[in-house]
Structure formats: C-alpha cells, structure tokens
Image (tube, rainbow, N blue to C red):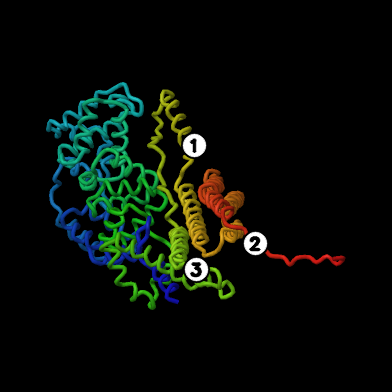
Amino acid sequence: MTGIAAIVLALLMPSHLRATDPFVITKLGREGKSLVQLAAETAPINPAVAKVLLASAESMNLGGTDVVIEELRAAARERGRARTILEELEAKESGRIQVSETTILTALRKAPNRERLLASLQSGEAKQVLRNRNLTNLTLFASVKSAAGLPLDVAILTTAFLLEQRALPPSLALHDQVLRQAAQPDYGLEELYLSMFALAKRFSSEQLIALMANVPDVNAMHILTRYIQEHASTAPLVFSAVFATKNGGGVAAYLDKYPKTAEEDLSFAFGAGIGGLNRVLEDQRPVYRCSVYDSVAGSSIFGGMLGPFVSLSAGAPTVAILLKIGLLALGGFLIATSTKFRRPNPEEKDYVFYPKYSLIRRGAFAALFVTLALILGEPYLAQGEQKTPPVRWSSPLLGAANAASQTAISTAQKITPMLDPHTILAIVTFLVLQAVIYAVCLAKIAEIRKQPVSSSTKLKLLDNEDNLFDGGLYAGLFGTAGSLILLTLGAIKPSLVSAYSSTLFGILFVALLKIGHVRPLKRRLLLEGAAEPEPTTTTAPVRNPFA
C-alpha cells in the first residue's frame, strides 16, 4: 500500500517535465495583478491601450470590466489635445462618434495627411528612414511615387514616426536593426515594412507605441505580426500579453513554438493573472492538460493535501521534479519488494539467494517503472515544438521573380526530420528496457557463479537460465512488432527508425551478454570440471560359477 500511495502522490505532483502545471499558474496569477486591474490603471493614462486590454479581458469573460468602461468614459471626457500629429490625424479621421481607436492606416490614407506627418518628422533617425521613400527596385512593394505606393508610404512613415517618438528604445536590438536595414536596403527591409504596415492596419499610434516599446528585435516583430495576421481575433490578446509582461520576445517565442495551443494557453494564464502568464513565458512550455488530473487534483479530497506541493513547484520547480521522480522510484521499488521473487522459494532450499543481487533486480525494476510512468504520465514529453514554417508573405505585388524562392520554401517544408521527439523517446525507452534486462541477467550470472556447488551443476544452472538470457531479444522483437502494428493502425507517427531500433538493441545486448559474459563463464566452468577428479565406483567381484 505504501508503494501505491507513493505512486499516486507522484502522479498528482503539480510538476511536469515538458509542461507547466495549471494549478501552479493559478497560484502565481492570484499573487499578482490581474488583467482587469491593469486595464483600470492604464485607462486614465492611456485610454487607447486600455481599450485593447479591455477587449482582451472581455474575450476571456473576466469580471470587473464594467469598472474599466467607466474609467474609459471619464478619460474620454477629460482627454485634451492630441500629443502628436499622427494622434491628431487619427482623431480627425475618426468621425463624430469614436468607439474604437482609429488605426494609423485609416489616418494616413489621404495624401494630405501623409504630407503633414512627413513635414513633422525632423529627427536624424526619422530622416534616415524617410530616404527609403525614393526606393524603386522593389520586390514586394510598389514604389511610393507610383499609384499603388500607399502601403509602402504608410509603412515608412509609421517607422519614422516611431523613431521620432522614441518608441524603439536604443537599448533594444530592434532600434539598431531598423536603422541598419534602412541604410542598406535589401529584401529584409521590405519584410520589415510589411510587418510595420500590418501593424499600422490594426493599431492606432498610441497602441503601436506601447507595443513596439516591448518588442526586442525584428524577428520577434515578424513572429508577432504573422501570428496576428493568421489569427485576427487574437490581436487584443497578443497585444495585452506583450504590454502586461513587457516581454515581447517571450511572447513571440511562445507563439512560434506552440502556434496551435498558444491562444488557449495564453488566455488561461492571463485569466489567472499576470504572474501566471509570466511563468508560462519563462518556462516556454505548454500548459498541462488532462481532464482526469484536473478533476482529481482539483477535488476537495486532494486539493488541500497538494497545496504545499503546489507552493514547492511554484518556488522550486527543479526540486519538485526530482521529488516526483523519487516518489515514482520509491513506489516501483516497494512494489518489486512486495513480489514473491524477492525471497527464496522453500522448495529451492539448496539454492543460495544473495540479498545484494535481489537489490539489483528491484532497482532495475524501479528504473524501468519510472521510465514507463513518466512516458505514460507525461503526454507532453514526446511533443515537439509546433514550429511554424518560415515567414512566407503573400502579397498581390509578388512577381515571378519570387516564384523560385516560394517553390524552394514549399519543398523544404515537406521534408520531415527522421529523428523527431516521438522517435527519440521511443529509442530511449527501448534502450532503457534492454539495459534493465541486461542488468538483471548480469545479476543472475553473478548469483550462479557464487553458488556453492560443483562446476557441472553451475553449467546446468546456466543452461536453465538460457531463456532469461534471450529475454532481450524477445523484448526487442516484441517492441518492433508492436511498433509496426501501432504504425499500421495509425496510433503513432510513422517512424521505422524507432521500430527497428528495438530489435537492434535486443540483438546487441544479447550478443554482448552471451559472448562477453556467458561464454567465458561456461569455458571456465568446463575447464574446472575437467580438472575435478572423476568419482570412483567400486564393484563387487563376479564369482565364476564353474570355479
């Protein structure tokens, strides 16, 4: 019972190898500020940003948003003169009733508005970017002077405006990267302006300033922009996550690693609180999801008992992981101890059992049990990063000159690596299984070698254990056959490497065992048996009946 209790406690431990526990996220979120509180604090200072935060909070169905709405109304009544030319143009183009903020693209759609903003940009960094308005040899954009030059003009003016307003802090790499690409125009500069145009299409000047102040480099900017383009409804969530955590690089990295579950993970963490979101971005791991685990660990019976472990996992995650593995090993060891093979069979009273070899067998079983428990209990262990394909912009301005590169990208995306996380995990599992069988066989060989019997008897004992010594080969064939069956049924991803590695490991370990250990021991026992004196038998003399 103690072993089973240790295993149950380990499985309920709120700590995971490649995932972040939801109860830990909830605990850290409660200890910090919530999204609604952040929106209420931001409303009097920057209503435009508060509107995005409010939209994100309402999409998560968080309570208390009514208070933020009142704060926004009060801020709108007290809002005075626009602080920048672009903000003034946005207010002008918003119309009489302004519910949502006017985007930069809407404000700059008219040529007079762009000329007015252009005249207001006087800093050296802004003028360096404005020189790109004279570019003509472009691939993704039409030149500014052409009839279709609005997108590029808006992107360039927006970039120059951000530099003018110091929205790109010199401490971040993004500042220097923008200036470097503006000074040496290439294909990367057009990608930069594509991202900037996409942002100008969705945010106002105040919102974009707040966003870009927390974006560390051009790569993070591209990832954030591409994700917003592909998931339009997530724009408030992504903006709020970057603004609240001041960690645009972490948000971008998470979106790039887990694009399929990022929205759900970030929404859950953000709903718990900013502290929980910070933990998810720090770990860069998905949120652990298991309905059975959630219902059991969240029940009234186990909830209070697991409270200290949640605190331990939140404060010292490495210690919590080691404790979980230790509990699994203890449970497996105690189960092995409770089985019958741990003590000698009364019918084998002449066979000597050595405790240390029994300890080796139990330890080997515990190691195998820990491996299988982690594989079955950690569904995210074999999950690789859901990496998105390389940036592939689609634009009606793309010409035939770019067709070759698009074809190359498509071909590269079809190539799948031979060693994905699932394959590596399967290979490691088969390797651990063979190592455990090998250790058990070595213990049995050592046990037979120490038996206080004759060499011929030891040879017979070795022959009796021949099936055990072939166990690695049987396990290898079973692993290959099982993998191929599951592959055929579609239960696992296609990977012949992992399937055939099982048999390969079985052949290698059995060959090493029999050639390196069993054969030398048998040779020695044969020589010792030959040197032993043969038993003499005395027979009674036969009488001659005719004598």
Direction from residue 296 to residue 275 in the image, left or right: left
State which quarter of the image contains the C terminus.
bottom right
Marks 3 and 2, Cα distance to the nearest angstrom?
A: 32 Å
The secondary structure type at the circle numbered 2 is loop
Quadrant of residue 115 within the rendered picture: top left
User: Image point 45% across, 33% down: which residue?
Assistant: 412
Q: Nearer the viewer, mark 3 or mark 2?
A: 2
What is the three-letter code of the residue carrying label 1? Answer: Lys
- Tell me the CA gap for discs 2 and 1: 79 Å
Residue 533 position (above or below residue 109): below
Q: Residues within 10 Å of mark 2 (few under 14, many from 20)?
A: few
- Residue bearing mark 2: 536
Give the number of the disc on residue 414: 1
- Quick check: can you spot residue 233? yes
Name the mark nearer the viewer: 1 or 3.
3
- What residue occupies the far front of the structure in this picture? 547
Taking 266 as reference, is 429 left or right? Answer: right
Residue 353 disc label: 3
Q: CA distance from mark 1 to mark 3?
A: 58 Å
Type of amino acid at the residue the image marks with label 2:
Thr
Reading the chain from its start, which is encountered first: label 2 or label 1?
1
Looking at numbered disc 3 in the image, what kind of residue is underneath it? Phe
Disc 3, SS: loop
Badge 3 or badge 2: first in the primary sequence:
3
SS under mark 1: helix
In the image: residue 489, left or right of residue 57: right
- Nearest to the observer: residue 357 or residue 278: 357
The residue closer to the viewer here, 110 or 105, is 105
Give coordinates of residue 540: x percent, y percent: 73, 67
Upstream in the sequence, badge 1 or badge 3?
A: 3
